[in-house]
Image (cartoon, rainbow, N blue to C red):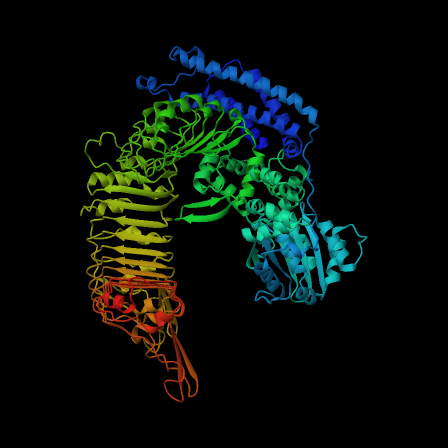
Amino acid sequence: MAAALLSPILEQLTRIVAQEVQEEVNLVVGVKKQVVKLKSNLLAIHSVLEDADRKQVKDEAVRDWVDKLKDVCYDMDDVLDEWSSAILRWKMGDAEENTHSQQKIRCSFLGSPCFCFNQVVRRRDIALKIKEVCEKLDEIAKEKAMYGFELYRATDELQRITSTSLVDESIVSGRDDEREAVVSKLLGESSQEAGDVYAISLVGLGGIGKTTLAQLAFNDAEVTAHFEKKIWVCVSDPFDEVRIAKAILEQLEGRAPDLVELQSLLQRVSESIRGKRFLLVLDDVWTENHRQWEQLKPSLTGCARGSRILVTTRKDAVATMMGSTGHRINIKELSDEMCGSIFNHVAFQERSKDERERLTDIGEKIANKCKGLPLAAKVLGGLMQSKRTRGEWERVLSSELWRLDEVDRDQVERRIFIPLLLSYYDLPSVVRRCFLYCAMFPKDYEMGKDELVKMWMAQGYLKENSGGDMELVGEQYFQVLAARSFFQDFKTYGREDIGFKMHDIVHDFAQYMTKNECLTVDVNTLGGATVETSIERVRHLSMMLSKETSFPVSIHKAKGLRSLLIHTRDPSLGAALPDVFKQLTCIRSLNLTGSSIKEIPNEVGKLIHLRHLNLAYCGVLGSLPETMCDLCNLQSLDVTWCYSLKELPKAIGKLIKLRHLRIDDSDVAFIPKGIERITCLQTLDVFTVCGGGENDSKAANLRELKNLNHIGGSLVIRNLGGGKEDASDAAEAQLKNKKRLLRLRLVFDYNQESGILIEALRPPSDLEDLTIDGYGGLDLPNWMMTLTRLRGLSLVHCKNVEVLPPLGRLPNLESVVLNSLKVRRLDAGFLGIEKDENGSINEGEIARVTAFPKLKELRICNLKEVEEWEGIERRVGEEDANTTSKISIMPQLRELRIHKCPLLRALPDYDLAAPLQELELDDCTNLEVLPPFGTLPNLEGLAFGTLKVRRLDAGFFGIEKDEKASSNEGEIARVTAFPKLKRFGITFLDEVEEWDGIERRVGEEDANTTSIISIMPQLRVSMIANCPLLRALPDYVLAAPLQELIIEGCPILRKRYGKEEM
């Protein structure tokens, strides 16, 4: 990690010196010699840091040296940041001084009379700090000679355990399903198989059991009988083609080859397997270098059909490189029960019954710490074998497992840390640092990807690329760590963010590697949190405090703290913050999410290094101080769900480094003037047009968005009017130039004159999601049909829109919401097929027309004037003899929800031809006959209510016509209605009395043709509510494998079945 700290400092030092020369300003004088000495020492230390980083794991003295170096690096980083901030402020110009003059004077600030005494002191203080840091680094540079560091070579200092194909099956538990899956893939035929061998990959975290699974499959009796030759090679890292080829040959020929050249070895391998069916296991593959694999691959061709390569790896990219994407098995964690079985087998070996009974309860708790990793269970079991007393077991249980001074060092290093260290050291140093940062979070803490990337960015971990996009670099680092299984339990939140966690063992490893830097304090550890970790040396701190816990002032000692996350509802936090901000001035990331603070104190302006400030969900936060605008380095500000917050600081335009401003679901009424100065802004989730009133003089208008062309993600523009001035501002905003904008919501004030305005709000052509809400015009904008990459479209409360454009022609549309429009018909014009159906068709050809080709979700609500929803009956050959047509409509539709369409008489035929999985019909009172929904083969959820339906009969099931249609004499007709339905609900069917059951079974119809009718065979949940006339439930509902049956507001049913809920 020290290597990753040093590189940015070198770059920053070079950049600052160059900047002072370029700007012809000398803010900090008398440090030229120190700067030269700093660079020299930094370069000398940097050359050996990789070696030092690896040696520190097993050498405490080296670790102490690295820790001292990191402390100095942090101090240096802070001093350089102060220096850089001084230059930035000079470039911006002090707000008060530039009120009278905009001219910048090229001079030394120490000699400029326009600067007050405290500014002179500040710059002299920077010079003194640079000299102090230089002296410390000089001492550390001299000490490095004591440790014999070398320029790091490619070989690993810690040797991996070489795997074999031998395995003790007596301690393998919980892998039966995976074992069967692997064996099945090894023995089965593949549709992709064309004679050449193909690869199967087992992918998962180190210690999860990939090698064990491969061993079990390798030794399986059927597998052994199936393959003529079986070869096991432990590949490891580096990927040595010569060594691998030799290992393959040795097992094929039964002796070590005498060849040394790669091509000769590969030629011999090719000859030895020609025409043979073989199984090759490549265990522990790390390389992502496609060239290395391509050198070896040709020698494995020419084998017999059915040959296989089985690969174990921790990297997704390796599975892709090996060409096994379609033959990949992700290995999951074992259950606590299975881990306990492995642990007990090892830990209680040769123990008496009395010992087992005395230690079993503690052993269960220790085994649970393995969290599904069989390797951890084996290692812990082996560790506990030597511990005889209950006290010894309790000490292990209560320790931080991976602290080498509390457990047997060799056992931990060799059995647990080596798999994790190897994966860790295989990462670039910049990615390692990002991973270790996650040690600051509590165990089992759900992190958010976007939030974590912003925190990495605040710490300076993400280097700007040529496009200046640190966020994309952070996204790449996240993907690397996720692919290596350092993260798990992923959840997707909308289209924008991902939640995830770290496995406890991985978290322990990260905490061990950041022993003195990351600390989590909670209610249970508050008293003794600093026993192992000196609070003075902590750089990243999480505090998880209860409402009853007073804020600990001991954190004031952490002068070098750079990250602070406080999770508490304690109302006294607000009173504690001024002193926190005075004492902890090095903070770069501050997270107060969900706290009960009512205001941010003025002292926040002292946090000159602050880059990330998260105040989301601070529901009683009423104001932000103007001093916040002195935070010239601030990159991210989040006040979402601060619903008491009315205004942002008026000088927010001074935050010229701000990249992310999130205010959605707060009560912020407008964006202050000056937002146009923040040209690097990438996130602005809400922009509210002021529209006059008392805030008009303070509020920015739309034209201030003109130069903010980096804005991306989601943007909501609220309170759009309809005047000519608004349209002029909108045109100046040039939304079409915001190429990164993916989701846009335009919220109007129902003004009928907003037609000109909406045309001026043309978005970029790559927009993926569009919502138009409250639009009062008659016609939708012409630019809508140019958005060919649009995936989601919502038209809401556009109450004067009578005609829809041909939305079916938008090729990538996946979701459509139509709510509260004046539309009267959903016809061929809406589908976009009326003109083009035969536009370019020659005689005798078939015209294939697809409307809404990718649509998966359609929601229609409150279309009170829609009567007709036209179906398209015509299919191939039904138009004329010369030209035929085939029309496909919504061929991928999965969800259909129709609510409050009181005049709608019927659904179109293409809805019933779609692969629907979810269907809702509610408050469509003109719908008297239900279509044959039972014929929908993929339907899993069905709910309808407030219809004029009188019966639920065979027509609804869709079986009255088909039951005997294809049955020959003497055959049995098998008919299934709703074959996959799992959830079914009906509500407010006031006129329904009969719900037909199907009593007929095999042999009850006639002697020649029998029938089996199955209805809702997979039904799990059913709710029947407010059907007052319904007399009975059909037999198939009562016979279904129900897990939950709810009956409410059905008095006759209640009387019949005796209870309200079943």
**Residue, far front:** 354
- Along the line of sight, the residue nearer the viewer: 729 or 790: 790
Residue 637 to residue 76: above or below? below
Residue visible at 71% across and 60% down in the picture? 230
- Along the line of sight, the residue nearer the viewer: 109 or 246: 246
Q: How many labels does the image show?
A: 0
Judge left or right: residue 116 versus residue 353.
left
Picture quadrant where residue 150 is located: top right
**Residue, far right:** 258
Q: Where is residue 614 in the image (x, y as percent from the top left)?
A: 39, 34
Residue visible at 52% across and 41% down in the picture? 477
Picture quadrant where residue 943 is located: bottom left
The answer to whether residue 906 shows anywhere in this view is no
Quarter of the figure with the C terminus: bottom left
Quarter of the figure with the N terminus: top right
Judge left or right: residue 823 versus residue 524.
left
The answer to whether residue 23 shows anywhere in this view is yes
Q: Where is residue 437 in the image (x, y as percent from the top left)?
A: 51, 35
Residue 12 to residue 496: above or below? above
Picture quadrant where residue 47 is located: top right
- Along the line of sight, the residue nearer the viewer: 429 or 698: 429
- Along the line of sight, the residue nearer the viewer: 1019 or 703: 1019
Residue visible at 64% across and 43% down in the picture? 384
Residue visible at 74% across and 58% down in the picture? 269
Q: Where is residue 827 in the image (x, y as percent from the top left)?
A: 26, 64
Q: Position of residue 280 (x, y in %)?
A: 68, 58
Residue 730 to residue 863: above or below? above
